Image (cartoon, helix red, strand yellow):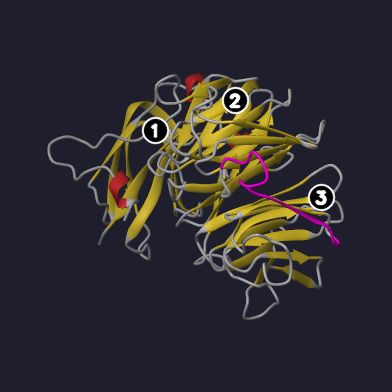
């Protein structure tokens, strides 16, 4: 199990080394930056989350491998083939139109439109849709739905008119369409493919960029977003992230040219200025701010899975991440602070795994709170520390075996944590 691989080893001669983890202000005790929703603690139908979209009423729509979930922050509705007219439980993409209709791309059931009461299904049997596997969706400024399938690209006006594009009638380098982005200023459609590079469609003009004819670093583009200057940024399958600077020029940020922790990126979302959130296959969630990269993984945060499949950011600072096996993650980035502004605090603890009593030793005299959380972010124990170098922590008698998060929140605002296995 991947969580166990991040745990500190058994104490043999000296104390374990702690892991620096997520940080948030001392003034926000009771508020946690991380909230995890999974099939055990919520109605989320499956822990593999593939798509996330926010509608005009502030409701989140979450696509999983076993159904679609509607979540308003408190209440859930789940749509599956057994209880609704949704054509497939495997959800791969979601987009919301100006009328607040939900367009749902499925794994094998085609395209579904849901207006809140009625489902309308489009598949290759009743429409020109080139394939029932829909990986990506976008809506242009005229209200057309752009549908990326594994068999080509479709443009649909939402009523009756379809246009189908493939490698035979366009400059698409591949029929497997992984990502789509619309420039709201120009209505240019950016199309990211698997093994076929990047293609732009500007009305009737097509332009293609590949490894062979430009500085594009990778022919497989899994995510697209635009910054404040309408520069297109992309997450690539094996070459980090890239920005199209114009013409054949691309800026690439990979593990060789930057501090990004992984070249295998799955998704990218622009926040503001040069601030982005990036999903990776193996290095969790990455925050990019200018040239600085900060990663959040299972080893240094409450993130339940290092494989991020999709991302969304709301109008504030809340990041939503869909993981491969760990469910849905809500991260309130406003509650995170920089470790550089805190004192050099660390702590050790033993025995590992913990049983009933835990000995904790600090690197300096410390006042604050020792806290234990479940991996879902629920506080189960808080113990005050007053100007001490060490403390004893007695675990609740009803705490079950498993993995928890142990942290020290100092009065200065630092919060340092480590994963804590408990075995009785």
Q: Give, as a single range, the part of the protein colored magenta.
A: 159-173
Q: Nearer the viewer, mark 2 or mark 1?
A: 2
Considering only vertical position in the picture, is 412 above or below 49?
above
Considering only vertical position in the picture, is 393 above or below 83?
above
Between 297 and 237, the one nearer to me in the picture: 237
In three-dimensional space, the C-alpha distance between marks 2 and 1, rounded to whole angstroms, equals: 31 Å
Disc 3 designates what residue? 144
Q: Residue furthest front?
A: 168
Residue 254 numbered mark, or none: none
Task: Specify whether 333 is left or right of 219.
Answer: right
Q: Quadrant of the N terminus?
A: bottom left
Q: Are marks 3 and 1 in contact (CB under 8 Å)?
A: no
Magenta part, dominant SS: loop
**Which residue is pictured at 34% across the width and 59% down the height?**
402
Q: Which callout, 2 or 1, points at the residue further toward the start of the chain?
A: 1
**Which residue is pictured at 44% across the width and 19% down the height?**
257
């Amino acid at each position: 199990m991947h969580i166990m691989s991040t745990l500190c080893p058994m104490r043999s001669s000296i104390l374990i080394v702690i892991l620096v983890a997520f940080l948030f202000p001392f003034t926000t005790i009771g508020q946690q930056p991380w909230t995890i929703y999974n099939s055990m603690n919520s109605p989320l139908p499956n822990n593999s989350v593939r798509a996330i979209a926010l509608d005009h009423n502030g409701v989140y729509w979450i696509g999983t491998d076993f159904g679609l979930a509607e979540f308003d922050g408190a209440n859930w509705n789940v749509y599956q083939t057994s209880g609704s007219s949704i054509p497939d439980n495997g959800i791969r993409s979601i987009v919301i139109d100006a009328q607040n209709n939900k367009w749902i791309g499925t794994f094998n059931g085609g395209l579904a439109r849901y207006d809140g009461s009625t489902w309308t299904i489009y598949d290759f049997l009743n429409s020109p849709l080139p394939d029932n596997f829909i990986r990506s969706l976008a809506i242009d400024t005229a209200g057309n739905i752009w549908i990326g399938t594994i068999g080509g690209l479709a443009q649909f006006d939402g009523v009756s008119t379809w246009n189908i594009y493939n490698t035979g009638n366009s400059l698409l380098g591949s029929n497997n369409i992984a990502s789509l982005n619309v420039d709201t200023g120009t209505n240019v459609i950016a199309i990211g493919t698997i093994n076929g590079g990047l293609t732009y469609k500007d009305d009737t003009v097509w332009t293609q960029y590949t490894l062979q004819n430009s500085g594009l670093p990778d022919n497989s583009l899994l995510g697209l977003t635009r910054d404040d200057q309408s520069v297109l940024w992309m997450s690539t399958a094996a070459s980090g992230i890239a920005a199209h600077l114009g013409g054949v020029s691309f800026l690439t940020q990979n593990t060789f040219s930057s501090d990004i922790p992984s070249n295998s990126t799955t998704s990218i979302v622009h926040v503001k200025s040069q601030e982005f959130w990036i999903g990776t296959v193996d290095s969790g969630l990455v925050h990019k701010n200018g040239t600085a990269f900060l990663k959040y993984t299972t080893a240094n945060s409450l993130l339940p899975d290092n494989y991020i499949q999709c991302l969304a950011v709301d109008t504030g600072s809340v990041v939503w991440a869909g993981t491969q096996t760990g469910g849905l993650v809500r991260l309130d980035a406003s509650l995170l602070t920089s470790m550089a502004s805190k004192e050099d605090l660390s702590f050790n603890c033993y025995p590992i795994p913990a049983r009933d009593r835990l000995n904790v030793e600090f690197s300096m005299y410390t006042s604050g709170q020792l806290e234990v959380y479940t991996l879902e972010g629920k506080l189960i124990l808080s113990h005050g520390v007053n100007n001490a170098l060490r403390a004893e922590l007695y675990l609740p008698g009803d705490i079950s075996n498993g993995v928890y998060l142990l942290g020290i929140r100092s009065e200065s605002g630092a919060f340092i944590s480590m994963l804590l296995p408990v075995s009785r």
